[in-house]
Amino acid sequence: MNDQMPPAPHESSRVLPPDESTLKRARTMIFIGNIAGPVSLFIGGVLLGTVGLACAAVARRNVASVAQREGAYQPTAQAMRRSATIAMVICLVAIIVNAVTAIMLFPQVMAAVQSGNFAGLGLGGATSGATTTWG
């Protein structure tokens, strides 16, 4: 009667080996880096790109230590290191594009703020007149 029932799945907490835990955290950070770079081009700007770059850089650093050790996790860690490097490049390109765009638009934004005419900041400069469909 000393046989104990195994715990229910929600009650058991599996403790991961250190290398597997490191790779799991790095996988999440690489995913954040891969998503944050392209999304920062549309919303978020330089700040979101910087967060993605930081996540990818930390993931690459953590994975590099596992990739250097011999073991079962080495091939996975090497592949993840390449993925982290790609995420870093994606985020760097997004940061550069966002920064260049901000620098190019800054004079126009300042002129619009000083004049109070914000209509010129739109992409197409929508007009309402006889040329519209409903005109």
Image: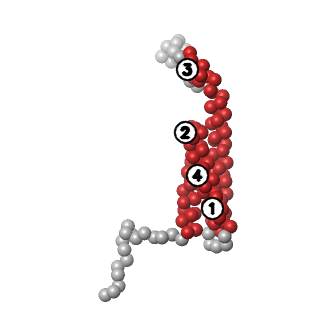
- Identify the residue under disc 1: 63
> In the image, which disc is placed on residue 72?
none
37 over 70 or under it: above or below? above
Residue underneath mark 3: 113
Q: Is residue 102 above or below residue 110?
A: below
- Give whichever of discs 3 and 1 has the lower sequence position: 1
Residue beneath label 4, please? 55
Identify the element where label 2 is drawn. Answer: loop
In the image, taking residue 21 as reference, residue 107 lies left or right, namely: right
Disc 3 versus disc 1: distance between alpha carbons? 47 Å
User: Is any part of residue 76 visible from this angle?
Assistant: yes
Mark 3 and mark 1 residues within 8 Å of each other at the beta carbon: no
Disc on the earlier residue, 3 or 2: 2
Q: Residue at x 66, y 34 (%)?
A: 100
Whether tag 2 and tag 4 are in contact, CB under 8 A, the answer is no
Secondary structure state at the residue bearing disc 1: helix
Give yes or no for contact between labels 4 and 3 (Cβ–Cβ under 8 Å). Answer: no
Q: Badges 2 and 1: C-beta atoms under 8 Å apart?
A: no
**Disc 3 vs disc 2: which is toward the camera?**
3
Q: Is residue 124 visible?
A: no
Q: CA distance from mark 3 to mark 2?
A: 22 Å
Amino acid type assigned to the residue bearing label 2 in the image: Gly
* CA–CA distance in space, label 4 to label 1: 12 Å
Residue 38: x, y in percent? 59, 43
Circle 3 packing at 10 Å, graded few (<14), some (14-19), many (20+), is few
Q: Which residue is denoted by mark 2 in the rendering?
A: 44
